[in-house]
């Protein structure tokens, strides 16, 4: 960040890398296009320092754990305090401390800083936090003690908004994790090789082991494309090798947020077999699900209410018990073995993509922010 003090309309703080965080960059773009002075402060996870006056990334070498948060706060807090903003958005639970510090430091009787908490998940249900009791207690207490500073909040679907609205008694606005609008439909897909695609971090609970095992129930012409990276990659590569499907699994590594839909559009089916390991997963409506739709991919997702509701409404695929790999394999072959059915699914995906995109969703976001500016 250039030296000096910054006066902004909106400051967004995230514990992720803005280069790969589609939500924060959409927020930034929308605010800028509406004429507001806005900035995102996040982490630099790839060593490529190419900050602008609107995106600032603090170097963080650790991938997780206490060291990550130590580096995150050491790097982000000075930048977060340097800016005076009318509205500060904490992009997740872990960004609440620097957001609160900014609010407390810059609050004046004549100019109150407003804080929006973007609670994208039920954090007390996150498997990664629940596995370690000390971490769970710490973050649960932090969230509870932080709510008194929050003026308004976002979340990603109606089910979570209802739960959090009762819990915290603050107003919640649903801002879904939908991608930017894309008007072009992918060209004809060859079916000599059929690609199943997953997009997202390689983390526990996302059904990645099941996706690799699924290949053993499918003919050799089916392959799996995994877009993303994470701590599980080595383990997944070992599993693919033990099942003799290494040649059918392709890891792309991390892809810039604006390129994910383009990568997905080269596949045939978007598949996500998230495990039911608590309400956080059961009520999920993740960005990757909407990216499948934006890429005009028929989808196979778990029988979880928020995703299943959209799948059924638009007729874009199927919801399945994520533990039933036999039925999942049958659906994959059914969708890709019938040209008429596949064509109809594509038509339905086209209709869904024209409705479930950021051009439609951003009005909710902008209205909620501008009420506080």
Image: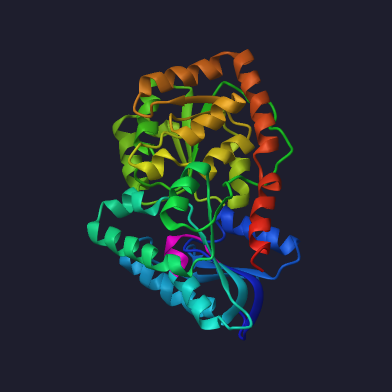
Q: Which residues are magenta?
A: 89-96
Vertical order, 163 against 93 (above or below): above
Vertical order, 348 against 85 (above or below): above
Residue 95 highlighted magenta (yes or no) = yes
* Quarter of the image with the C terminus in it: bottom right
Q: Which x, y percent locates residue 361? A: 66, 47
* Quarter of the image with the N terminus in it: bottom right
Q: Is residue 349 left or right of residue 238?
A: right
Vertical order, 329 against 108 (above or below): above
Query: Would you identify the image quadrant in which residue 320 lies?
Result: top left
Q: Is residue 318 visible?
A: yes
Q: Nearer the viewer, residue 151 or 363?
A: 151
Residue at 28% in and 52% down: 130
Residue at 44% in and 17% down: 330
Residue at 48% in and 61% down: 16
Q: Is residue 219 visible?
A: no
Q: Is residue 199 left or right of residue 258?
A: left
Q: Which x, y percent locates residue 164? A: 45, 51
Residue at 55% in and 82% down: 106
Residue with the most extreme bottom position: 4
Q: Which x, y percent locates residue 157? A: 52, 44
| Colouring mode (rainbow / by chain / secondary structure / one colour) | rainbow
Residue with the most extreme left position: 133
Q: Which x, y percent locates residue 21? A: 54, 56
Q: Is residue 112 left or right of residue 229?
A: right
Residue 251 highlighted magenta (yes or no) = no
Q: Nearer the viewer, residue 160 or 49?
A: 160
Number of numbered discs overlaid on the protein picture = 0
């Amino acid at each position: 960040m250039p030296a000096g003090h910054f006066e902004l309309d909106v400051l967004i703080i995230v514990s992720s890398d803005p280069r790969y965080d589609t939500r924060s960059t959409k927020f930034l773009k929308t605010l800028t296009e509406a004429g507001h002075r806005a900035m995102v402060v996040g982490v630099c996870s790839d060593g490529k320092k190419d900050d602008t006056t609107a995106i600032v990334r603090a170097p963080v070498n650790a991938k997780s754990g206490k060291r990550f948060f130590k580096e995150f706060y050491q790097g982000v807090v000075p930048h977060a305090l340097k800016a005076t903003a009318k509205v500060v958005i904490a992009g997740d639970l872990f960004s609440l401390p620097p957001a609160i510090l900014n609010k407390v430091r810059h609050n004046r009787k004549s100019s109150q800083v407003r804080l929006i908490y973007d609670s994208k998940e039920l954090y007390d249900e996150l498997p990664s936090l629940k596995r370690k009791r000390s971490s769970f207690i710490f973050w649960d207490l932090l969230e509870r003690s932080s709510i008194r500073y929050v003026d308004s909040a976002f979340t990603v679907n109606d089910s979570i908004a209802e739960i959090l609205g009762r819990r915290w008694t603050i107003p919640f606005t649903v801002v879904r994790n939908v991608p930017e609008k894309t008007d072009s439909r992918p060209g004809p897909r060859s079916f000599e090789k059929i690609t199943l695609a997953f997009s997202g971090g390689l983390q526990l609970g996302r059904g990645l082991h099941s996706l690799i095992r699924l290949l053993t129930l499918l003919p050799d012409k089916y392959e799996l494309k995994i877009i993303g990276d994470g701590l599980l990659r080595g383990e997944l590569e070992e599993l693919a090798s033990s099942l003799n499907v290494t040649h059918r699994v392709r890891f792309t590594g991390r892809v810039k947020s604006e390129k994910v839909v383009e990568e997905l559009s080269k596949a045939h089916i978007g598949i996500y077999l998230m495990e039911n390991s608590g309400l956080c997963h059961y009520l999920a409506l993740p960005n990757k699900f909407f990216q499948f739709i934006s890429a005009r991919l028929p989808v196979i997702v778990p029988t979880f209410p928020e995703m299943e509701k959209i799948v059924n409404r638009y007729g874009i695929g199927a919801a399945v018990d994520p533990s039933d790999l036999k039925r999942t394999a049958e659906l994959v072959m059914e969708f890709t073995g019938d040209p008429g059915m596949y064509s109809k699914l594509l038509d339905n995906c086209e209709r869904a993509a024209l409705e479930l995109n950021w051009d439609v969703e951003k009005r909710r976001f902008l209205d909620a922010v501008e009420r506080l500016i």
